[in-house]
Image: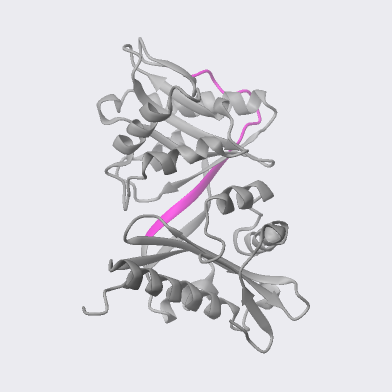
Amino acid sequence: MTNSTFRIRRPSLNDAQAVCDLVAACDTEDLGAPDIVLDDVLDMWSGFDLDHNVWVVEDTDLSLIGYAFLEEDSEEKLFSYGCVLPAARGRGVGVSLVKSLEARASELRNATGVPKRLQGMIPTLCEDAVRLFEAQGFAPVRYFKRMGIRLDTEPAAAILPEGFTIEPFMKGRDEQAVHEAYVESFADHWDFAVPPFEKWAEKTLLPTFEERWWLIARDPNGDVAGFALGRMREDLLFIEQVGVRRPFRGRGLALALLQCLFRASYHAGQMLVSLGVDATNPSGAYRLYEKAGMKSDYAISIYEKPFTLLAE
């Protein structure tokens, strides 16, 4: 797609650093600080179809001023993200990216014969993005919080229920058991789609994966009762998921897993820990993270637009 002042094209791996810099500039404008490093882009792109589900926007001087991707989360749900360089806003870049996402959603609907829901993630307080999405027929469906903690002193040791233990994940041994615990733990979460084991296990093959940041809580029989899955970045330890199987909830396992990760991060010299949480999660996760000492940094909104079958 072309415009008199910009051009949309597919990216190559050579664009990864420029995309990282672009998203960091947007984060700084909309969230107050960057929330991405190069490894994040490379990790995501390793699982993306760059030829069909990712777009970058070039200015007339060939610099990147826009970026978007679409991820096929499940048979009927499509997740997307996009951003426009602050200095380039108001030129129609965002509208063009949203139309590209919508065209791809329609294409996937027509190819599969399955209705699609296209979701987009935007900063809740970014009024330009809110107006853009609502003008294109998207509606808000959920709100999330990004929470963080600075470990100025050594965190307290975790207190575990009698007979329970916490240990690092071991590749080649724990993939299947942790995947099953993950599916069970998140089964009642909003909009959860069960990932195929093979796709889920790809996380353990990423260059940034380290076993020590995936912790497993085991019950007295040695079975997986809960888990906390983290990833160390240049700037912080990001906790991607914390889950406890239903029979073991209410015993303090989630808090213990968090405290173990906090202590490990502190001793590794990384004092910042962050995660995202569904602000309306009925499990009380937000209150748990507050109890662990974490505070809300900013809010994210999920907007959605349906793409029904043409005959409907």
- Where residue 307 appears, x then y in whole percent? 32, 73
Q: Nearer the viewer, residue 246 or 48?
A: 48
Residue projecting furthest to the right? 61
* Lateral position of residue 292 relative to residue 16, left or right: left
Taking the magenta stretch, the answer to whether it contains residue 255 is: no
Up-down: is 126 above or below 59? above
- Where residue 207 appears, x then y in whole percent? 62, 38
Quadrant that contains the N terminus: bottom right
- Where residue 23 appears, x then y in whole percent? 64, 61
Up-down: is 14 above or below 296? below
Q: Residue at x 59, y 30 (%)?
A: 210
Q: Residue at x 31, y 12 (%)?
A: 221
Q: Nearer the viewer, residue 156 or 274?
A: 274
- Where residue 274 appears, x then y in whole percent? 56, 41
Q: Nearer the viewer, residue 259 or 209?
A: 209
Q: Residue at x 60, y 79 (%)?
A: 93
Quadrant that contains the C terminus: bottom left
* Lateral position of residue 17 relative to residue 252, left or right: right
The reply to whether residue 293 is in sight is no
Residue projecting furthest to the left? 312
Q: Residue at x 70, y 61 (%)?
A: 15
Residue 51 sits in quarter: bottom right
Q: Nearer the viewer, residue 51 or 266?
A: 51
Magenta-tinted stretch = 142-159
